[in-house]
Structures are given as structure tokens and as C-alpha cells.
């Protein structure tokens, strides 16, 4: 599975750790930046990540900023992007299994690298359950998305 990763300046160091983990675990990685700790605007890199998923260049994404909040809000403005800010493995797994989450958002100033690795593993190991109740709920969510 191709995984797209993106960050702002606050997430740069953690992104490097996550990219190394993904490559070690033999995922195909599309790194859309940023590529330094020089200040940038997170919406620019969030959009790059979202477009990669929308254009089917990647199946899932990992998005990192200082708190994770701004990038998560921005990602969820994009059609077909279902981002969740997770700081525990239960949410990282369940977000995929129940809600078909395709972007994991992390706050580099909130969690450390070892927890981030666990979250990425939980997110990528999970798959949507397809249970009727979850499909029904996603249908309602998609309807809201279409209506704007």
C-alpha cells in the first residue's frame, strides 16, 4: 500500500522518524513535505497529502503538525478525506474499522516518537469492518459531504 506523508515545520522531525519506520516495514512512501523545520503553513502540505489520496496516488495518509488539530481540520475540508487526530492506539485502529478513516493526524508536540510509531502501526494494520451499522453511518456522512 502506498502511504502519503506530510507535515509542517513542527512535524518535520517526527515525519522523518515515521518515514523511516514505513520504509523499514516495506511500505511505499510518498513524502510530500515539508522537508525542513523552516516555518511553513500546514494547509499547503495538508492539501498535497489530500490531493495524493484523491488522485489515488496513495491509499492512506499520515499528517503531522504541532498539535495535529489544524492539519486535521484542514484535511477534513477535502472531499473524500477522512482524517482523525489520534493519540491512542484504540482510536487509530477503531477510526479505520468503524469510520473508514484514511488519514491519521498526529501532534508532534503532544506525543513522542515511540507512541507515534505504535499509532501508525495500529492505523495501517486496521481495515474497515464493513458491518451494516458502520456502512449506514458512513452513508449518512457521505450524504452530508455531498450537500456541503
Image (tube, rainbow, N blue to C red):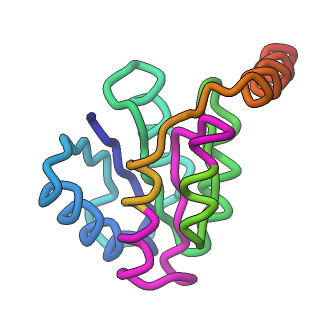
User: Which quadrant of the figure contains the N terminus?
Assistant: top left
Image position, residue 53 (x, y; %): 43, 29
Q: Which residues are magenta?
A: 95-119
Task: Report the residue at 54% width, 67% height from top.
Answer: 89
Q: For residue 132, what is the image quadrant?
A: top right
On screen, residue 123 versus residue 99, left or right, reads left
Q: Closer to the camera, 22 or 74? A: 22
Q: Is residue 38 above or below residue 51?
A: below
Q: Is residue 61 above or below residue 19?
A: above
Q: Residue 58: within the magenta?
A: no
Q: Is residue 103 above or below residue 22?
A: above
Q: Closer to the camera, 105 or 129? A: 129
Outermost residue, front side: 131
On screen, residue 99 versus residue 20, left or right, reads right
Image position, residue 81 (x, y; %): 59, 33
On screen, residue 47 versus residue 34, left or right, reads right
On screen, residue 39 versus residue 103, left or right, reads left
Task: Report the residue at 70% width, 36% height from top.
Answer: 77
Task: Report the residue at 25% width, 41% height from top.
Answer: 30
Q: Closer to the camera, 129 or 25? A: 129
Image position, residue 148 (x, y; %): 85, 21
Amino acid at each position: 500500500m502506498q502511504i502519503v506523508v506530510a507535515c509542517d515545520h513542527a512535524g518535520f522531525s517526527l515525519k522523518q522518524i515515521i518515514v523511516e519506520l514505513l520504509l523499514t516495514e516495506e511500505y511505499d512512501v510518498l513524502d510530500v513535505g515539508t522537508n525542513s523545520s523552516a516555518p511553513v503553513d500546514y494547509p499547503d502540505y495538508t492539501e498535497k497529502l489530500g490531493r495524493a489520496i484523491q488522485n489515488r496516488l496513495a491509499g492512506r495518509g499520515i499528517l503531522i503538525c504541532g498539535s495535529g488539530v489544524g492539519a486535521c481540520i484542514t484535511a477534513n475540508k477535502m472531499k473524500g478525506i477522512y482524517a482523525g487526530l489520534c493519540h491512542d492506539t484504540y482510536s487509530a485502529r477503531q477510526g479505520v474499522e468503524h469510520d473508514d478513516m484514511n488519514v491519521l493526524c498526529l501532534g508532534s508536540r503532544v506525543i513522542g516518537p515511540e507512541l507515534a510509531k505504535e499509532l501508525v502501526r495500529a492505523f495501517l494494520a486496521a481495515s474497515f469492518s464493513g458491518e451494516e451499522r458502520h456502512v449506514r453511518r458512513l452513508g449518512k456522512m457521505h450524504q452530508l459531504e455531498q450537500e456541503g
